């Protein structure tokens, strides 16, 4: 079972001063409204209603945190999460669909998103959700360029590939990789940007996305360490048998 399936709502914030006082890695999900961000989070976490999409694009103004560890899905939603057992956070950032909102609200969101992705020390990586039919809009590029100077990884998920032919999907993926490869630092070195195809409807790319997010959150090492411990630590029966 994927560790992402343990995801559980932790808190919601509307100002940077309200960010949780935790030190675990955070993986933030960003994307334009209607790109399929909420749907992607829900299918990755195997939970229908974990992340909610606003009925009006661009209206969701909060940053929502989902904990991994410290609780399990079967627990009652009112049971407290054991904060000291949290291993990582998934962070759902407001969708940047600005068509229906005022200028002041746009500026507020830009400041909130920009400050979070540029300054949050716990933020380990960004997952950028883009509609495969319309990737790299101006706002997507703005998010890339906000985050790139941190030197942290960005994994781009190109959603709704079920709407494309196989040939179109191959072309989109190749063009997206070329776009990401065009970003280099002051020394001419490429940034740690990766990209994949995804379809929530057809479950295309689900395993790939899961593995990447688990890796970025440091949970893969956790799993490997736990497995090694189980192998290296003999049980009582083994001890008895060796003594005989």
Image (cartoon, rainbow, N blue to C red):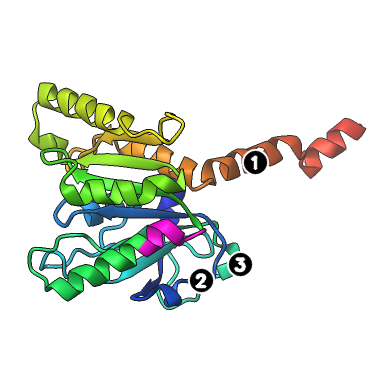
Magenta range: 115-121
For mark 1, give the secondary structure.
helix
Does 76 sit left or right of 39 as displayed?
right
Quadrant assignment, res 170: top left
Residue 26 placement (x, y as % from top left)? 46, 56
Residue 118 visible (yes or no): yes
Locate the N terminus and report the quarter of the image it occupies: top left
Going from N to C along the chain, the mark reached first, 1 or 2, is 2
78 up-or-down from 226: above or below: below
Residue 165 placement (x, y as % from top left)? 8, 26
* Dots 2, 3 in contact, CB < 8 A: no
Residue depicted at x 20% and y 39%? 199
Q: CA distance from mark 3 to mark 1?
A: 19 Å
Question: Which tag is nearer the camera, tag 2 or tag 3?
Answer: 3
Quadrant assignment, res 53: bottom left
For mark 3, give the secondary structure.
helix
Looking at this rendering, what residue extends furthest in the top direction?
167
Residue named by callout 3: 84
Badge 1, how many Cα within 10 Å: few under 14, some, many 20+?
few
Residue named by callout 2: 81
Quadrant assignment, res 60: bottom left
Residue depicted at x 84% and y 33%? 241
Residue 226 lies in the magenta stretch: no
Going from N to C along the chain, the mark reached first, 3 or 1, is 3
Residue 161 placement (x, y as % from top left)? 15, 35
Residue named by callout 1: 225
Badge 2, how many Cα within 10 Å: few under 14, some, many 20+?
some
224 up-or-down from 147: above or below: above
Residue depicted at x 23% and y 65%? 52
Judge by depth and name the residue closer to the eye, 204 or 232. 204
């Amino acid at each position: 079972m994927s560790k992402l399936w343990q995801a559980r709502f932790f808190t919601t914030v509307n100002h940077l001063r309200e960010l949780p006082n935790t030190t675990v890695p955070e993986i933030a999900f960003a994307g334009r409204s209607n790109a399929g961000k909420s749907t992607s989070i829900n299918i990755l976490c195997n939970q229908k209603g974990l992340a909610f999409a606003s009925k009006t694009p661009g209206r969701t103004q909060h940053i929502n945190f989902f904990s991994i560890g410290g609780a399990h899905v079967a627990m009652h939603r009112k049971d407290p999460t054991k904060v000291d057992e949290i291993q990582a956070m998934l962070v759902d950032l407001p969708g940047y669909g600005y068509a229906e909102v005022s200028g002041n609200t746009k500026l507020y969101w830009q400041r909130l998103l920009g400050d979070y992705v540029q300054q949050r020390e716990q933020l380990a990586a960004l997952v950028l959700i883009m509609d495969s039919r319309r990737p790299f809009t101006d706002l997507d590029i703005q998010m890339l360029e906000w985050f790139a100077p941190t030197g942290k990884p960005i994994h781009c998920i190109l959603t709704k590939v079920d709407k494309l032919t196989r040939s179109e999907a191959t072309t989109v993926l190749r063009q997206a990789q070329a776009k990401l490869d065009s970003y280099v630092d002051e020394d001419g070195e490429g940034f740690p940007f990766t990209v994949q195809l995804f379809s929530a409807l057809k479950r295309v790319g689900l395993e790939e996305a899961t593995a990447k997010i688990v890796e970025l959150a440091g949970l893969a090492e956790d799993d490997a360490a736990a497995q090694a411990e189980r192998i290296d630590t003999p049980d009582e029966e083994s001890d008895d048998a060796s003594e005989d």
